[in-house]
Amino acid sequence: MGTLNEFVKELASKSPVPGGGGASALVGAIGVALCSMVAELTSGKKKYAEYQNEIDDIIIRAGDSVDWLLALIEKDAEAFEPLAKAYAIPKDDPTREQILEQALVEACSVPIMILKEVAGIVDIVDALSKKGSRLVLSDVGAAASACRCAMESAAMNVYINTKLMRNTEYAKKTNDETETLLKDGVFLCDAIYRRVADELRCV
């Protein structure tokens, strides 16, 4: 992936990769990294001793999740390559349709992975909103916001590919799975964000 500066500059260029999929993975990794930071700053504090075992588990889960989401940035770029090649096949080539269809399936597979990963880790954001150090509660709210953004942007990168599929049954099944993950994840992120905001505004 190179440095963050290189990634963002490449993202801003006319190059098709990295694109929205890689960006969603990065935003998700940032959201989960914030959770790791909050957990680290909560760990070992007497005030939160009763949650120590859970905090230890969160640190491990968050670390693994950040590593996976960063890896998915590269995987998303790799998955797009066959699609770019498929579009370059002459339209009169009898193999084009089948190759393009498979490439579309592959291209939306990584955004689904990103969505699943972030949706599956949002529970630790919820836990930290209740059990994490109140000194860094704003970072929990920021994590919830980042995770919501990551899920929504990953979903967009699923839909852009399923929209072009000729296998409408597969496309609908994929969209339905995406929408379920998105709905549940966004609902929880919104609830966490509102709860944190209400607590921070309380004077």
Image (cartoon, grey):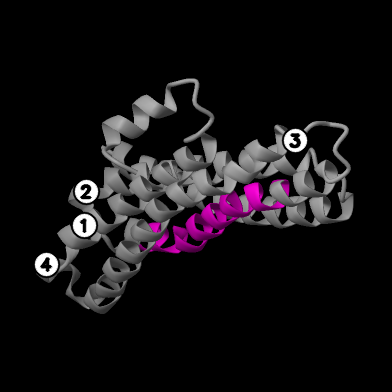
Picture quadrant where residue 58 is located: bottom left
Image coordinates for residue 57, horizontal then vertical, percent = 30, 74
Image coordinates for residue 194, horizontal then vertical, percent = 45, 43
Under tag 1, what secondary structure? loop
Image coordinates for residue 121, horizontal then vertical, percent = 45, 61
Instruction: Give the Cα separation between the discs numbered 2 and 1.
Output: 6 Å
* Residue extent of the magenta highlight: 104-127
Under tag 2, what secondary structure? helix
Q: Residue at x 32, y 49 (%)?
A: 140
Residue underneath mark 1: 133
- Amino acid type at circle 3 is Ile
- Quadrant, the C terminus: top left
- Amino acid type at circle 4 is Lys
Image coordinates for residue 38, horizontal then vertical, percent = 23, 55
The image's mark for residue 73 is none
Instruction: Give the Cα separation between the discs numbered 4 and 1.
Output: 9 Å
Q: Are marks 4 and 1 in contact (CB under 8 Å)?
A: yes
27 relative to 8, above or below: below
- Amino acid type at circle 2 is Val
Residue underneath mark 2: 136
Q: Residue at x 56, y 57 (%)?
A: 113
Q: Are marks 4 and 3 in contact (CB under 8 Å)?
A: no
